Image (spheres, rainbow, N blue to C red):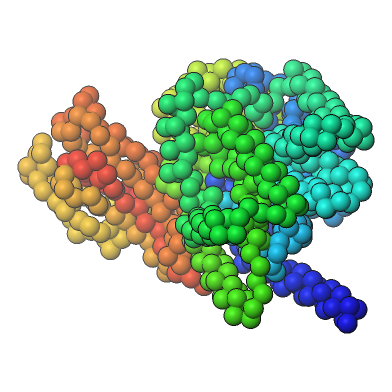
Amino acid sequence: MAMDSATGTKKFKWLSITILSVFLITISFHYHRNEIKTYPSYIHAWAQADQYALALGFTENGYDFFHPQTYNLNKQFPNNFAHPYPTGVTSADFPIHAYIPALLMGITGSTSPFWMRIYLLLYSLVGLIFLFLLTREISKNFLAPFAAVAFAMLSPVFLYYQATFLPTIPSLANAIIGYYFYVIHLKGAKNRHFLLALVFFTLATLARTPFAIFLFAVICQESFYFILRRKIDIRKCIGFLTSILLIFGYFLYNQHLRSLNGSIFLNLLSYTESFAQFKLLLSEVINRWGNHFFTSYHYLFLLGLTLASVIMVIVKGREKDSLRNKFGFQILIASVGSILYSLLMAKQFQYHDYYFLDSFFLPIILLVGYLSGQFRIKSKIQKTISIVVVCIFIGLFQRDAHKRVKSRQQTAIWDKTEVLVQDFADSKQLLDSLNISKEAIILVLESQTPNNAFVHMRRKGFAILGSNREEIQNAINWKYDYIVVQNCMLYPELLQTYPELLEQTVRVGGNDHLTVLRKTVPTKKQQPWDLLGLTKRVPKLHSTINFDDLPESYWGNLVSKSNPLDTANNVGYTAQNNEWSLNFTLTDSTLKSLQSIYPVFKANFFSNEKEGKILFIANYEVGNKSVSQYAFSIELNEQDAGKWRSISYILPAIHYTNTGKPNRYTVFLWNSDKKEFCYDEVSISIY
């Protein structure tokens, strides 16, 4: 009978792992199948591109682990991108999770983002399997491990970063593995498991410093036991000391790299100046990211577990299980550590949601496993009800997580980084076609981030993130070979900020998305259209509306009135109470015939308003989903009030995608500030 029981238990464990594996693979395939080969994009594309650039850097530096490099030559720290460096070497947390994908790239001969994404995805799944095993060790029922894993896996922020490029994900997995071996040790196993726990906690901390929270939480707990037992375990102390020395040793080496080469990675504390400011910032973090950390059903599930636990303590008294008490104590220490970390890095939480994964996420999912594991499920009816409840919550987690993740993968109207990612997609091929050496140094103006443009070009260079005149003036005198800039940023924004480009550069080449320039004095006076290569190009489609003649079918939402300065002519008009104004639409059939669109917008505007703005938005949809969206702001001011003025914009280029779904391209005016204005001679040229 004992043998039959053991065999049955073993079969059940294998069945559990099989069910878990099917669940993890299904969810992973559902969320990541379309993005697994894509470049860094959407939320925190900056940080993701930096990590991908590290991996690419290893493939180009002979796999020199101790001299990590990216393509960026003007580092953010300590000079805020204002100082050029001769190499792309940068300090970085122990870059093992960029190095291993780089080795995979070397073995396969492919530097596709696939290798880094699949590496992180698989690492995360290993971590979730160990979360399952860990929760099973401290649970009194069979459902708690599934609940803990589903709770973690279906966190929107975890799903979003699970198959990206950030070392947070493998460090989180290593910390979970460390806790698994620590629990085995707490059950009474030999020190071998404790040493394995230290190995994984150390790896987690080396690759992502905030995970020191959990290493030091274990050190604190073990130190408490030393005091309680009045006996110090020398072997454990040697293990602690070794971990700390390794971490501190690499920290010193990192500081050495930083002092010589600068860095693209933050190494400073970022705390608030007062508790009142911290409370205000905490409120902003919750409002901004609260439903990204977990869905509302996650919070409801955790609240229900907490209330049930309180009732259980009242009815049955405190937990008597020694292992669960020890692990509950560890969760408490880790939670306190996460709170302290959040105080030290408070300002970063406001803008970086993955700091939550570095800190609070692990104590919370461990708490879910701990609380859900305290209930004994014996009778058949208890098992049935419990399974139904957990399955319902998993379904609700999935439903809301899906919505949230999809919302994170949308292009916001002010997201210049996503437009840059799209514009630089074929930049390597462009530079190759212009016979620009792979060793050429590129200056990218309006690059938005240090590395996003460069991982596409596969060339090193300098990144000027915005359109600040002083920064451009400083960088234009550095030593580089070519300037690359997006067409939609070159005109009018950059040329308005720094018109000297017309006198200091000439066009080398380009495409609908990018212009490549060389610094040299032009032989004749240039106009913006010369740099953009549009002087001799004939548009594939041109449409103008002047409100005196019958408009073409592309135009919609037409309202007109007499010209305020010349009543003999009609002009377009938008009243204060009208939020939506003139629009221009290209339908699927037109887009098919054009294949690609490189739009230039021109118009005359008039308003008596002395402040406010009109938003001019270009939107490309595939199957009713916006895949490219960007807004330009037409500022109203006192200087131009009561006058007609001309404006023109180069819009982001779009290439038609034949997906079988209807495509639509729309340009429209959004009267977001509810102002009164007129417009005339509005034209769009499609090149």
Q: Who's the residue at 35% across and 52% down the image?
A: 667
* Quarter of the image where one finds residue 83: top right
Q: Does residue 421 lie above or below 220 as drawn?
A: below
Residue 364 vertical position relative to residue 275 in the rendered view, above or below = below
Q: What percent of the width, then of the height, locates residue 544?
A: 28, 52
Q: Nearer the viewer, residue 223 or 84?
A: 223
User: Relative to residue 293, is residue 54 depicted above or below?
Assistant: above
Residue 357 at x, y = what percent? 62, 45
In which quarter of the view is residue 232 placed?
top right
Looking at the rendering, in which quadrant would you find the N terminus? Answer: bottom right
Position in image of residue 497 (x %, y %): 43, 25
Q: Residue at x 71, y 61 (%)?
A: 139
Q: Is residue 407 left or right of residue 40?
A: left
Residue drawn at (16%, 44%) of the image: 576
Residue 490 appears left or right of 455: left
Q: Residue at x 74, y 62 (%)?
A: 136
Instruction: Give above or below for 176 relative to 255.
Output: below
* Residue 138 relative to residue 48: left or right: right
Q: Residue 611: where, in percent of width, then height? A: 23, 31
Q: Is residue 90 visible?
A: yes
Q: Nearer the viewer, residue 501 or 265?
A: 265
Q: How many marks?
A: 0
Q: Is residue 462 visible?
A: no
Q: Is residue 683 left or right of residue 191?
A: left
Of the pair 412 and 663, the residue shown nearer to us:
412
Say which of 1 and 24 sits in front.
1
